[in-house]
Every structure is written in C-alpha cells, then in structure tokens.
Amino acid sequence: WRHRWLLLSFTRREILNRYVGSVGGLGWALAHPLALLAVYGLVVTAIFRVRLPPDLGTASYMAFVAVTLWPWLMFAEALDRGMRSVQASGDLIRKIAFPRHLLVTSAVLACFALHAGGYLLVLFVLRALGEPIHLAGLPWAFVLLAFLGAGTIGLAAFLATLQVLLRDVAQVVAVAMSVLFYVPPVLYPASLVPAAFRPWLDANPLT
C-alpha cells in the first residue's frame, strides 16, 4: 500500500506501452478474444454441431463460450506477462531500488483491466442480442475475478523467480497452459463431465 503510486504508474505504463505505435491501439485487446470466440463458435456449432444441455436454458453456445473464455484469457495472458516481467525489466532493476514484486503485480493488473473492459462490452452486446445474460450477477463475477487475479499474481511471482534463474520455465509453462486449457469447463459445461471425474473438476481452482 505504501508503494501504491508506483504500482499505478507501472500498471499505466504496461497498458500504454503495449500498443504504442499501433494503429489499432486498445482495440487489439478485443481482437484476440473475439477471433478465438468466432473460431470456437464456428467449429463447435457449425462443424461438430454441439448443443448446450437443457439445464443451461436458452443460451447459445457462443454466449456460453464468451462468458467462460474471457476469464481464462485474463488468467493465461496475465500469468505469461507477469512471469516474464522481472526478466524483461532487468535494466530498470539494476538502476533503481524498488519492490520487485510490483513489476509482476502491475503486469497482471494491466491484463485484467484490459480484458475486463472487453468482457463487459461483450456481455452487454450479448444481452442486447437477446442472450440470457443476467447483468445482476456482474458484481459476483468480479468478486470471483478478484480472487482469480490474486491467485494469478502469486503464481506469476513464483514463476517469475524461476524464470530469472532458468529460461526454460516459460517454455514449460506454455506447454502446460495448452493442456490446462481443456481441464476446466471453458469449452464445455461442467454438467457434461462424467460423475467419476467431477471431484477432480471441482478441486481445480480454475473451475
């Protein structure tokens, strides 16, 4: 808390420097999630012809994936950027004395802030298109996202320490994230998981 001004400064720098010199600017923060959403929606609904189970009401598969995919992308990108933040700021660390964990925290906060804006926009658009998006649940959703952000900061700080010592950590994490993407119910409802695997699914914090 004593260094909150420095944390805000680092977070602002993270957001502004990410798209400096690009024509699209902050629009690129929406481009990646929307492209993934379009691909998954096309492949699953048009090619595999998957439909959501009746317990999810009238929601379309696109709406389901939009709600579940965005928090995953927040976590995945924030973890990657937070893990690399200390190593990427080596010159700054050698010149100035400050709490190193602020680099990790600011990287995670910047990712969550950018994606949260896109998340809200997409939810409001889905609601306008007639999808059963209950906006009254948004405060609870952001409480859960706050817990996800805190966990991401802790995990990213641990991995950032290892990344400084061993450059292979980022490669291992990239492979692990590719596998982990299919473990929590992001592309599928939890109700479709066989009962034998439900305890493992419920034990996963990302669920």
Image (cartoon, helix red, strand yellow):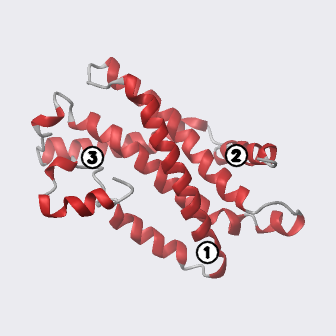
Q: Give me the C-alpha separation between circle 1 and circle 2.
A: 21 Å
Please tell me in which quadrant of the rendered image residue 50 appears.
top left
Q: Amino acid at mark 2?
A: Thr
Residue at position x 39%, y 23% in the image: 136
- Disc 1, disc 3: CB below 8 Å? no
- Foreground: disc 1 or disc 3: 1
Q: Amino acid at mark 3?
A: Tyr
Give the residue at mark 2: 11
SS of the residue under disc 3: helix
Q: Amino acid at mark 1?
A: Gln
Give the residue at mark 3: 40
Label total for image: 3
Residue at position x 53%, y 59% in the image: 79
Give the residue at mark 1: 163
Residue at position x 45%, y 42% in the image: 144
Q: Earlier in the sequence, mark 3 or mark 2?
A: 2
- Disc 1, disc 2: CB below 8 Å? no
Q: Is residue 24 visible?
A: no
